[in-house]
Image: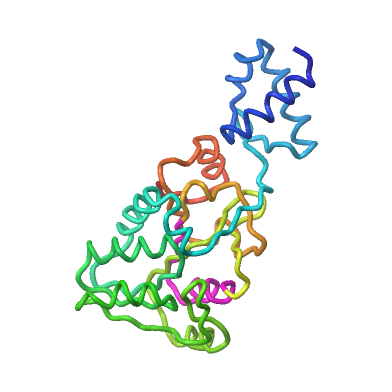
Amino acid sequence: MFARERHEAICEMLKQQRSVTVAELVEKFGVSVETVRRDLAYLEKRRQLTRVHGGAIAVSDKMRHFSALSERMSENAEKKRKLSETAATLVSENDVIAIDSGSTANIFIRVLCEKFEKLTIVTYSQDILEAASDKSGFSIIMLGGYYMPSERVFYGFLTDECLKHVHVSKAFIFPSALSLKYGITINIGEFYNLQRGLMRISDRCYVLADSTKFENASPIRLCELDEPNGIVTDSGLDEQIYRQYKEKGINLII
């Protein structure tokens, strides 16, 4: 097989499985380890992949499609449920926490309602307010401002001002995408101040993102991968991606 054919085959594999190992490429093509490494180095120079220890992952410049909140509610629901249950282990009875908005946030609050009797929750999400208001032991601090019907959140300078007057032990944020190249990214510009505000008012901040959001990008950079205290995801995360994030010192909680 010619080098060009191997390069095309490697790129096609990365489209299908997001990562490859040197060992599987050696076996597939019947070439030496050195030849595979040269292939990967060549493709990395052409920005067609990112080399990692023992292999390569797909380049992290794919713009993640952003759909309406109503559509996102049904996307990857099982993954969101599992990571929400894991994130709930970071919460203690009587905690004072802040919860961002979004489809995963809607599942996370339901899990908290099932597992806890007393929490104080700071939020700007109408969905969080409605879900938590039925729990008699939950206290809600609602941050007001301009209302965004499409995302069911309050935002703007009034919300930003409210954030200056509260403090929480833990904040839970739900971004649009994550990648080694671009960090943690979001789609809606109005959310930047909201989410950065939650990071400022919390002792500890956690990002919750299902495995499909990894090695994708959205237009607005929220922060570096290592700024939160941890990133909670589901067990569907690709092993090569998991290993590379851990090698970079990112605290992944599976």
Where is residue 243? Give x, y as percent: 52, 38
Where is residue 232? Give x, y as percent: 43, 53
Residue toward you, 136 or 23? 136
Residue drawn 73% across and 18% down? 35
Where is residue 142? Give x, y as percent: 39, 83
Q: Is residue 192 magenta?
A: yes
- Residue 124 drawn above or below residue 84: below
Residue drawn 46% across and 75% down? 152
Q: Quadrant of the N terminus?
A: top right
Q: Which quadrant holds residue 226? A: bottom right
Count every numbered label the image shows and give the total: 0
- Residue 190 drawn above or below residue 14: below
Where is residue 238? Give x, y as percent: 50, 37
Q: Which quadrant holds residue 38? A: top right
**What colouring style does the render use?**
rainbow
Q: Is residue 218 left or right of residue 147?
A: right
Residue drawn 69% across and 30% down? 11
Q: Is residue 108 magenta?
A: no
Highlighted magenta segment, given as a residue range: 191-208
Q: Is residue 107 left or right of residue 103?
A: left
Residue toward you, 236 or 69? 69
- Residue 21 drawn above or below residue 121: above
Q: Is residue 68 left or right of residue 202?
A: right
- Residue 194 drawn above or below residue 20: below
Q: Look at the magenta stretch and give its main secondary structure.
A: helix
